[in-house]
Image (cartoon, rainbow, N blue to C red):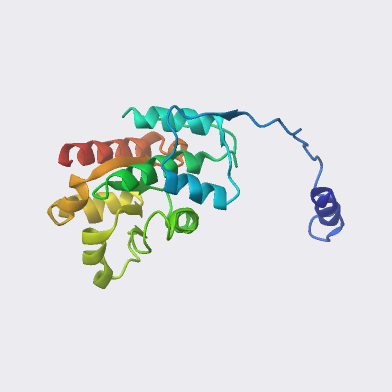
């Protein structure tokens, strides 16, 4: 109802009038839920329930079950289908069971990293991790904060260029983080194509060699 009203409003605006030639309606699909091989950590389960999440979709269950086995996971589902929760649950669960665990999230843009940081903090703080355990690390990060991030951060959100130029060349100062590195998350993997994709692939190879 609200979408129809908004679309009708758009067609009446001077800047859009006559420009919208087609509206595609995608019919809803019934939710398909699954069950984990092993229940989530109680703290994480309680946090999800407090956010109104009582069940996980099939692809989220499959992703988490696979990640728990130590295997690589590629998630390819529709927009707004909960892909982010696939890796956030895996990462937060391992941190709850082993506080020395670390995770590295790679995003193609700084804006996306900031957006995902807000989502992760909303999910995890303060019940699962403490404020400051999850941070962005990019060209805008103040020098005064960088040493603390290397010592304390459990989840670092960055981009391939910062990993290439700001982290890997200084890997000795990141040794504590790398020793506990359990997960590397590559979000929006479809953008890493052509020369850029080859560049990112080599960065990941360097990361694996160092770790």
Q: Position of residue 54 (x, y in %)?
A: 58, 41
Most foreground residue, 118 or 192: 118
Q: Residue at point 49% right, 43% down?
A: 84
Picture quarter with the C terminus = top left
Q: Quadrant of residue 34?
A: top right
Question: In the figure, is residue 5 to the left or right of 180?
Answer: right
Q: Residue at point 23% right, 53% down?
A: 167
Q: Residue at point 32% right, 62% down?
A: 139
Most foreground residue, 201 or 45: 45
Most foreground residue, 118 or 4: 118
Above-or-below relation of 197 to 12: above
Question: In the figure, is residue 2 to the left or right of 83?
Answer: right
Q: Position of residue 186 (x, y in %)?
A: 39, 41
Most foreground residue, 175 or 56: 56
Furthest-front residue in this view: 42
Question: In the figure, is residue 85 to the left or right of 3?
Answer: left
Above-or-below relation of 74 to 151: above
Residue 96 shows in the view? yes
Q: Residue at point 59% right, 35% down?
A: 78
Residue 74 shows in the view? no
Question: In the figure, is residue 7 to the left or right of 67?
Answer: right
Q: Position of residue 190 (x, y in %)?
A: 46, 36
Q: Quadrant of residue 173?
A: bottom left
How many numbered marks are there? 0
């Amino acid at each position: 109802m609200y979408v129809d009203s908004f679309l009708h409003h758009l067609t009446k605006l001077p800047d859009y009038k006559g420009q919208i030639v087609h509206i595609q309606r995608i019919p809803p699909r019934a939710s398909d839920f699954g069950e984990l091989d092993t229940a989530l950590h109680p703290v994480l389960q309680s946090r999800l329930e407090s956010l109104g999440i009582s069940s996980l979709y099939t692809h989220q269950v499959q992703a988490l079950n696979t990640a728990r086995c130590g295997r690589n996971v590629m998630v390819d589902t529709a927009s707004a289908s909960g892909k982010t929760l696939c890796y956030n649950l895996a990462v937060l669960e391992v941190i709850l069971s082993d506080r020395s665990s670390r995770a590295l999230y790679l995003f193609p843009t700084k804006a996306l990293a900031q957006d995902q940081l807000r989502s992760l903090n909303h999910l995890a703080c303060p019940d699962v991790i403490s404020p400051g355990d999850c941070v962005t690390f990019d060209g805008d990060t103040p020098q005064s904060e960088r040493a603390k991030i290397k010592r304390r951060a459990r989840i670092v959100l960055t981009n391939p260029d910062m990993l290439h130029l700001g982290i890997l060349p200084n890997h000795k100062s990141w040794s504590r983080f790398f020793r506990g590195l359990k997960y590397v998350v590559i979000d929006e993997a479809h953008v890493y194509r052509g020369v850029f994709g080859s560049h990112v692939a080599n960065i990941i190879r360097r990361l694996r060699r160092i770790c």
